[in-house]
Amino acid sequence: MTDTILPNPTPAPAEASPRGVSPAAIVALFLIPVAMLCFALFAFKPLYLMWCKVTGTQFRPNNPDVAAAATVHTGRYVKVFFETTVLDDMPVRFWADKTSAEVEVGADATNLYHFHNVSDHPVHFRPVHQVSPINASTEFGMKVCFCFNDQVMAPGETKEFPVVFSFAPKLDERVKTVTLCYSLFEKTDAESAEALQQRIKEKTGVDSAVVSPQAPGAAAAPAPSTGSATAPAPATAP
């Protein structure tokens, strides 16, 4: 009897996703636009400011009742992220000691901000702070902040300013994270106060982007410490 020789079975083709798109391609198609959006937001400052407005960010919030309130230990914590932005191509390095911190609701929290004028001429700027989400900004109070006043830095000068803030015990329970961002806008002798206010308004899209008067119970920032013309590189320099 003659043996029958069977052909080797053909391996089954790898299963593809619907319409022939592999899972890796689907992931790539999702991640690429996300990465492009993140790059655009942080590389181009006007887009970043627009994003803050759209996503519910309030500029220059400071609830004077929260700032003046006594400490209440609630045992509840929120994570606060600290961001710094320098606009108008100013020659200033600007960073915070901490990029994030666990903050107890009802108690004071602090951070230290560093400035270094890397140019050979003075710089004059207006700090504008913003808090998101918006339902956290109404329960946010500043006790000590360099943002209460415009700032001037001599050529090569370094400064350090502490910031003291708190959240009211009645902060929305749904709030788990908060972002506190400072933006520096250049001031020049050729630009009037009204023109600067209008320019900040146009860039931020809000009416409240003006220098806030010192709130009741809030203290102006103490005199900054100055150092040499060369500032040490921070671990999280921008």
Image (spheres, rainbow, N blue to C red):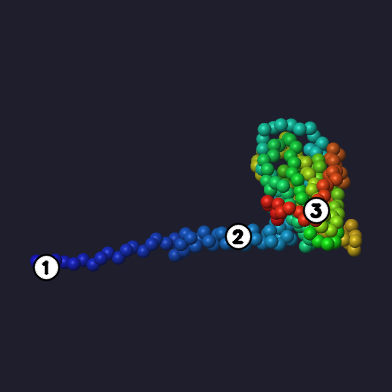
User: Mark on residue 214?
Assistant: none
Residue type, mark 2 in image: Ala
Is 134 above or below relative to 32?
A: above
Which residue is label 1 attached to? 2
Q: Is residue 204 visible?
A: no
- How far across and how far down the image is residue 228, in percent? 80, 53
Which residue is label 3 attached to? 228
- How far across and how far down the image is residue 206, in percent? 79, 54
Residue type, mark 3 in image: Ser
Residue drawn at (68%, 52%), measured in percent from left and top?
Answer: 236
Helix, strand or loop status at disc 3: loop
Quadrant of residue 187 within the rendered picture = bottom right
Residue drawn at (73%, 53%), measured in percent from left and top?
Answer: 232
* Separation (CA) of disc 1 from disc 2: 65 Å
Q: Within 10 angstroms of label 3, few (less than 14), some, or many (20 or more) residues?
A: few
* Separation (CA) of disc 3 from disc 2: 38 Å
Sequence-first disc among 1 and 2: 1
Which residue is label 2 attached to? 35
Q: Do labels 1 and 3 touch, CB within 8 Å?
A: no
Q: Quadrant of the C terminus?
A: bottom right
| Front residue of this view, candidates 177 and 185 | 185
Q: Is residue 155 visible?
A: yes
